[in-house]
Image (tube, grey):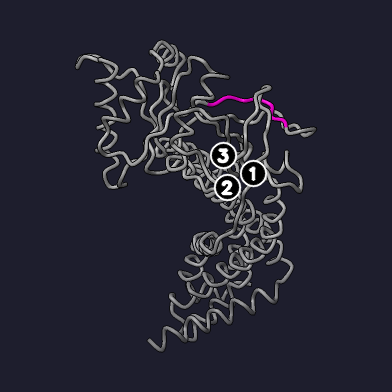
Amino acid sequence: MRWLVQEWWEGLRIAWDALRANKLRAGLTTLGIIIGIVTVTLMGTAIQGIRRSFTQSISMLGTDVLYVQRFSWFINSHAEWVRQERRPEIRWAQVRDLERQLKLARAVAPVIEGREPVKYRKQRSDSVTIIGTTDQFVHTGGLTVAAGRFLSPAESEGGRPVCVIGSQTATNLFRGESPLGARIQVRGYSFEVIGVLDKQGDFLGAFSLDNQVILPIRQMTALFVHNPDYTIQVKVRDLDTLEDAREEVRGVMRKIRRLSPSKEDDFAINQQDQFLKTFNRVTSTIATAGLFITGLSLFVGGIGIMNIMFVSVAERTREIGIRKAIGAKRRAILIQFLLESASICLMGGLLGLAVAWPLMLVIRKFMPATMSPFIFGIALLVSLLTGVLAGFLPAWRAARMNPVDALRNE
């Protein structure tokens, strides 16, 4: 074991001496590796950042919440969209029947959405999401009330003109003033603010979940949407029974909508994992294509390393002959040149990471990106493997040299 350590140490020392003797050549050779590591690292950080941001956004849907709707979230063709568009709408009586018959549900909330301008005195906020629902929405939506309270069952059923507003709506309309007890105007109708929600953030960067007003569903249907197509949110009692709950919802809905066993479902049961599966499939394709393209720069850098190592072997043929003549084994020569090649690539990897870090900070201003220790380690490992693979053929050629022929070389 000791002799093996000595061989590696001696090979590393000779390799570093060779690199110091040819600083300019070694520096220029690392450029290809630096560019390759920078591109691969930035691609990896961008994909990882986007995936993390997406997962955080999609978590707002709730892993234990089922969404009963007329349309599926993901439709593969126009023909499929036309077929689903012909489905009968989900009506209020069906919402009530489903709520009464479910046994595995913790909460059931019908939801109607629209967009309206909202006013308070001289302040106005355009295109605010108006949600009509019941008191159960605080559970199915995973909401937290920052000030005041949420809708009560009596307010949901009776349709008292009250509302709960999002944090962004509160900021836009009430500047330095408490919203609680104030009356806002939605399409000319007055609603008393009884609660303000905690900040939720954006959903997939498309729209803010904090720019909303939640009304009792009776008020929503009486004033804004008279014959709505409901979305029903079902929060299951236990995540372990999610599949059983899904089948229960499906069976009850088929019974309510009077579907015979031979007919397919005329409704959709959507859930969070559909987003995750579709997103992972898309990002995997993008990552494969992107890493392949950026990996080409590493391949070019590896070819440059191989070329320089062949030149280095040719220049040091006599040195190799002398070492072999005084007893150096093939293994020692092989290790020497592999370490030299790996050292060049490892330096290129470190320099590439040093360049990628500030670039990642700039990219973060425009899109989610993060450099984790995992990506850092993978980048160094890739650069090291590139050096070993690129230097193997030149090192193998040097190790197999005949010492007599090598000593004759001028």
Indicate whether residue 118 is drawn in magenta: yes
The residue at which mark 2 appears reads as 148
Is the residue under label 3 in contact with that under label 2 (CB below 8 Å)?
no
| Residue 38 against residue 175 in the figure, above or below | below
x, y percent for residue 236 = 33, 41
Is the residue under label 1 in contact with that under label 2 (CB below 8 Å)?
yes
x, y percent for residue 359 = 70, 55
Q: Is residue 45 visible?
A: yes
N-terminal of the pair, mark 2 or mark 1, is 2
The 10 Å Cα crowd at callout 2, few under 14, some 14 to 19, many 20 or more, is some
Disc tally is: 3
x, y percent for residue 208 = 62, 38
- Kindly report which numbered mark, 2 or 3, lies closer to the viewer in this rendering: 2
Secondary structure mostly taken by the magenta-highlighted segment of the chain: strand
* Mark 1, secondary structure of its residue: loop
State the CA–CA distance, disc 2 to disc 3. 24 Å
Q: Residue drawn 28% across and 20% down?
A: 256
* Mark 2, secondary structure of its residue: strand
User: Callout 2, which amino acid?
Assistant: Gly
State the CA–CA distance, disc 2 to disc 1. 7 Å
N-terminal of the pair, mark 3 or mark 1, is 1
Q: Is residue 300 visible?
A: no
Side of 307 relative to 281 (left or right): right
Q: Which residues are magenta?
A: 113-119
N-terminal of the pair, mark 2 or mark 3, is 2
The front one of 15 and 381 is 381
The residue at which mark 3 appears reads as 203
The residue at which mark 1 appears reads as 180
The front one of 276 and 283 is 276
